[in-house]
Image (cartoon, rainbow, N blue to C red):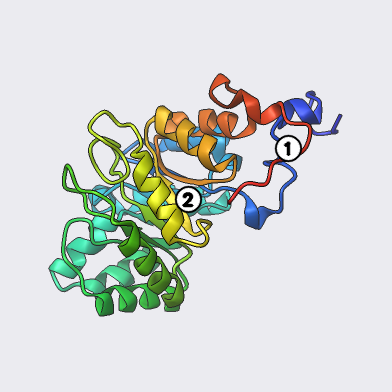
């Protein structure tokens, strides 16, 4: 029994992977905020802050906040050790409008400590993508990149994902997110019913020697459960709705029926991630 909890340590983490694994090996959780108020935002951090790593202000919503309100959100996230960033679509807008310098100035002035570099809506050259990643790093920001298009019916090319990941990591990206939008329906890894395309996952595993750099966007519970079952408690998951942040951590620990088996092993399993 720990001094900080009424619960036995095994009850707190039946999987044995979340509380006692080295921090660098723990699966990251990225939550998408599509416009919740400051009170709800504060409640989210109070309840689930210890179990989140990144908060993304979805798509281009960041510019629609009053500056003082936006800064209060950013300060609250950073005060609690979280990475907070605008959505990748906002950077794509800056690229399209030829305002990337102004974008980075605003991001830093407001206090964001992360950005997402993506080309889900526009076309972007490899050279420009690399330059944006490096600019983010030079500005002291944690850089996440995203692979995949947002168009309904778009698929993941496993070979191209592997190539893109290599270049992005070399340029300074921390993780590469696999596109699924905020719906998780009929895009990227998921079919028109939101189910995982198993063959695509198998091809990705064949192409990539390590998947630790990948963050899978998985907004739906069935998708989160599937990826956890495939890769284990410490897979990186993104675009998690705020209301699901604590529930996801319960699944990671084997505290939900979907992954109850995580707490039934005598010895820790050796996961790929």
Circle 1 SS class: loop
Q: Secondary structure at mark 2?
A: strand
**Residue 99 location (% of width, % of height):** 19, 72
Determine the residue located farthest toward the left in the rendered image. 97
Which disc number belongs to residue 54?
2
Q: Could you tell me which residue is drawn at 33 percent across and 62 percent down?
A: 159
Residue at x 56%, y 30% (from the top left corner): 251
Q: Is residue 258 left or right of residue 240?
A: right
Residue 110: percent from left, percent from top: 38, 62
Front residue of this view, candidates 68 and 142? 142
In this orientation, does residue 265 appear? yes
**Mark linked to residue 79:** none
Quarter residue 108 falls in: bottom left
Classify 201 as above or below 147.
above
Left or right of residue 251, residue 173 in this image: left
Q: CA distance from mark 1 to mark 2?
A: 23 Å
The residue beneath circle 1 is: 16
How far across and how far down the image is residue 40, in percent?
43, 32
Which of 9 and 190 lies nearest the eye of the viewer? 190
Question: Along the line of sight, which residue is nearer the eye, 126 or 86?
Answer: 126
């Amino acid at each position: 029994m720990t001094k900080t909890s009424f619960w036995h340590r095994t009850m707190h983490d039946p999987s044995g992977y979340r509380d006692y694994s080295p921090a660098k090996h723990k699966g990251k959780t990225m939550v998408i905020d599509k416009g919740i108020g400051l009170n709800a935002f504060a409640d989210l951090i109070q309840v689930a802050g210890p179990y989140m790593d990144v908060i993304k202000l979805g798509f281009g919503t960041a510019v629609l906040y009053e500056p003082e309100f936006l800064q209060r959100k950013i300060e609250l996230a950073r005060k609690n050790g979280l990475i907070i960033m605008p959505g990748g679509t906002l950077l794509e807008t800056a690229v399209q409008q030829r305002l990337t310098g102004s974008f980075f100035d605003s991001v830093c002035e407001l206090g964001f400590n992360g950005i997402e570099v993506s080309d889900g809506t526009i076309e972007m050259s490899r050279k420009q993508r690399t330059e944006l990643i490096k600019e983010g790093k030079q500005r002291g920001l944690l850089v996440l990149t995203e692979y995949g298009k947002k168009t309904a019916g778009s698929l993941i090319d496993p070979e191209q994902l592997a190539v893109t990941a290599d270049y992005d990591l070399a340029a300074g990206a921390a993780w590469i997110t696999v596109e699924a939008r905020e719906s998780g329906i009929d895009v990227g890894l998921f079919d028109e019913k939101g189910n995982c395309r198993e063959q695509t996952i198998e091809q990705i595993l064949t192409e990539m020697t390590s998947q630790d750099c990948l963050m899978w966007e998985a907004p739906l519970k069935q998708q989160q459960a599937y990826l956890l079952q495939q890769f284990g408690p410490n897979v990186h998951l993104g675009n998690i709705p705020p209301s699901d942040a604590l529930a996801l951590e319960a699944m990671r620990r084997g505290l939900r029926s979907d992954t109850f088996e995580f707490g039934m092993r005598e010895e820790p399993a050796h996961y790929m991630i």
